[in-house]
Image (cartoon, helix red, strand yellow):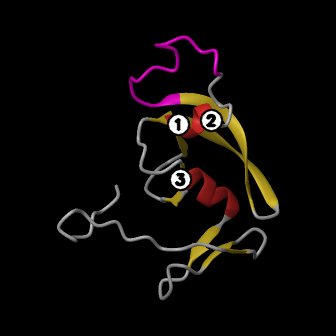
Amino acid sequence: MLLKKGYRHVYLSRSFARAHGFIPASTAPGKFGYSGLVSLGQWPITLGARTVSCPVYLSEEAHFDVVLGRSFWEKRGIRIDTGDVTAVWCGDSGEKVECDVVVVRDGRGEIVTVT
């Protein structure tokens, strides 16, 4: 899962969406196509003890199963400590979110920026 404020909605990778029933297993090829973002509608997203409903889109980006974008951040009032980016809180409940920071590096060891 990736918290990414630069993204507007919640995005699911195709493999995650299929494995968790967002896309029916009986779907014919070509349905939920590979032509950009496909709306999967409003879905409840639970983080900690609270659930909010957000628009969810199918994305062909497979680096992360789930990307929680700005709509989720705004509904939950997500706050990150600038001194420690692993210190993440939900402003609506005061709940601390357990998370890690992962630095992605390429074959030469250089940092890859995830956009």
Say which of 92 and 60 sits in front: 60
Total labels: the figure holds 3
Residues packed near mark 1 inside 10 Å, few (<14), some (14 to 19) or many (20 plus): some
Which label was assigned to residue 26?
A: none
Q: Earlier in the sequence, mark 1 or mark 3?
A: 1
What is the number of the mark on residue 15? Answer: 1
Q: Is residue 22 above or below residue 85?
A: above
Residue at 75% across, 76% down: 94
Mark 3 or mark 2: whose residue is earlier in sequence: 2
What's the amino acid at mark 2? Ala
Dominant SS of magenta comes to loop
- Spatial CA span between label 1 and label 3: 19 Å
**CA distance for labels 3 and 2:** 21 Å
Residue wearing tag 3: 69
Which residue range is magenta in the image? 25-38
Which residue ends up furthest to the right in the rendered image? 49
